[in-house]
Amino acid sequence: MSKVGVIMGSDSDLPIMQEAIDILKGFDIEVEVDIVSAHRTPEKLFDYSKNAHTRGIKVIVAGAGGAAHLPGMVAALSPLPIIGVPVKSRNSIDGWDSILSILQMPGGVPVATVALNGAKNAGILAAQIIGTSDQCVLDKIIVYKEGLKLKVEEASRNLK
């Protein structure tokens, strides 16, 4: 079974990152969750990044606020696709510091970046990546997207 790693810089990021965890579990994807601080636990960051693929992880969703080095550092060390979630933290500059730190990666070190606090979309994107090689997950994504369409159609009918 494919796994997705969901990591964050501190436990204060968990309320945001929980959205990624929940959506992935909704698609029946195994999730490994951990706190990995780029600044406070660099040795753990190196170990996690270099070895996640050996534990069956296929995609890493990394959330971070403030300077937001976590996703980029993981991307520098890991062969896996990395999805960065900029988190608006209490010491943030309206979240722009996190967004730009994750978005503006140098050539050769890609990080797919979602919107500020966009962990739900990060989870969906991770599931879509898994779905490219797992038909069961792909089928669940198709059903999920059809459900989104039906909700909009219902909301439209309710306006009339």
Image: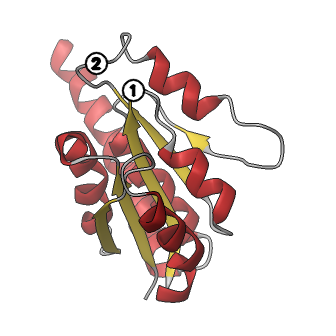
Q: Which mark is residue 91?
A: 2
Residue at numbered disc 1: 66
- Residue drawn 19% across the image and 48% down it: 11
- Neighbor class of circle 1 (other Cα within 10 Å; few <14, some 14-19, many 20+) is many
Local SS, label 2: loop
On screen, residue 159 above or below 115:
above
Tell me, yes or no, whether the two marked residues, 1 and 2, touch with CB atoms within 8 Å. yes
Q: CA distance from mark 1 to mark 2?
A: 7 Å
Give residue 138's position: percent from left, percent from top. 50, 69
Give residue 131's position: percent from left, percent from top. 54, 70
Type of amino acid at the residue the image marks with label 1:
Gly
On screen, residue 7 above or below 132:
above
Relative to 105, 25 lies left or right: left
Relative to 109, 12 lies left or right: left
On screen, residue 116 above or below 133:
above
Relative to 136, 82 lies left or right: right
- Residue drawn 38% across the image and 57% down it: 41
Q: Give the camera-side residue of 71 and 142.
A: 71
